Each structure stands twice: as C-alpha cells, then as structure tokens.
Amino acid sequence: MDAVLVSACLRGVPCRFDGRDKAASALPGLLAGRRAVPFCPEQAGGLPTPRRPAELSGGDGHAVLDGRARVVEDTGRDVTDAFVEGARRALAEALREGCAEAVLMPRSPSCGRGAVHDGSFDGTLVEGDGVTAALLERHGIAVRGVPGV
Ligand code: SF4
C-alpha cells in the first residue's frame, strides 16, 4: 500500500508548540486509503512539547537550508539547528517508508507549504515553505497542505 508522510498533529498527536493537536477532518479524504506515516519534525529535532512558538526569520525554509535564514523563538533564541535536524529526520522517515507524498500542517515553520509566518509573531503570512516541507520537495516528495485547519 502506498504511504503518505503526515504531520503528526493532523493525526491527533498533541505535539504542537502549545501541547495540543490539530486533528483534521479533511485528512482521510486526502489519504484516499493510503497508509499514513505520522511524524513531527520539531519533536524529532529534539524540541520539547510544549515549547515556545517559533517562526522563520529572514527567509523561508529553502533559505534556511541554504544558510541564508534562521528559525527563532519568540524569545529570540535561535532554534535553526533543531529545525534542520527535524527536517532531515522527516526526510529519512519518508524515504524509509516509501512515501512519495506528504500531507502537512499549513503555516508551520516546519511543515507549512506555500505560506509561512514572517518572523514578526503578529500573524503575518508570506509566501514560502517550512524547513521540512522545503527539504522534502528538494528530494522529489510532493508536499500538500490540508485545508480547513
Ligand atoms: Fe505539527 Fe509539524 Fe508542528 Fe510537529 S512540526 S507540531 S507535525 S506542524
């Protein structure tokens, strides 16, 4: 059976920064009977739950991977290394499980696809991808967000 990497919070795992999940009713339709592989890059990168909110600063996930941007918490602490490590682990999991596609949480600095917060912590969105979404895309894994969350 085909497998799809899924943001763990969308599957009901309480792994978000605030210790909650983001279970999505649209997920079963997007999976279309394929096997879900839940994964949380931020936990896998070594960050605790709950944790401080973090946003991309100076560019999106592609810029982070290229060393041109960072991920920072609202305290100013730089957590770029944990986000990049989480992305690497997500990619390894996707490859190990044979995932050709990923369904990820919108707007997240890890999982967001197409739009992410701009680093001002005021809700402003800019065009771009999270760090994990960017790395998966660079390795040929199609990433899509789940609507309605
Ligand atoms: Fe959900 Fe991804 Fe954030 Fe983990 S890193 S809580 S899977 S959006």
Image (cartoon, grey):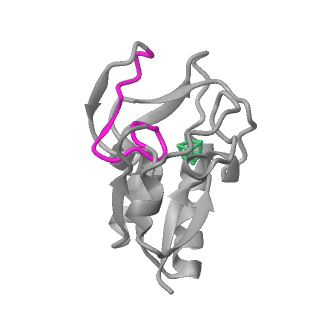
Q: Nearer the viewer, residue 22 or 48?
A: 22
Direction top: furthest residue: 122
Residue 93 x, y percent position in the rendering:
59, 71
Q: Which residues are magenta?
A: 106-121
> In the image, is residue 132 above or below residue 108?
below
Q: Nearer the viewer, residue 84 or 124?
A: 124
The quarter in which the C terminus is drawn is top left
Q: Is residue 102 visible?
A: no
- Specify the principal SS of the magenta part: loop
Residue 82 x, y percent position in the rendering:
63, 45
Residue 107 on the magenta segment: yes
Residue located 58% across and 80% down the image: 96
Direction left: furthest residue: 127
In-image side of 115 versus 25 (left or right)? left
> In the image, is residue 8 above or below residue 56?
below
Number of numbered tags placed on the structure image: 0
> In the image, is residue 31 above or below residue 41?
below
Residue 116 x, y percent position in the rendering:
35, 34
Q: Is residue 114 visible?
A: yes
> In the image, is residue 67 above or below residue 3?
above
Q: Nearer the viewer, residue 38 or 90?
A: 38
In-image side of 57 versus 1 (left or right)? left
Residue 98 on the magenta segment: no
Residue located 56% across and 17% down the image: 74
Q: Quadrant of ligand 1?
A: top right
Residue located 46% across and 56% down the image: 27
Residue 29 x, y percent position in the rendering:
40, 61
Residue located 57% across and 18% down the image: 76
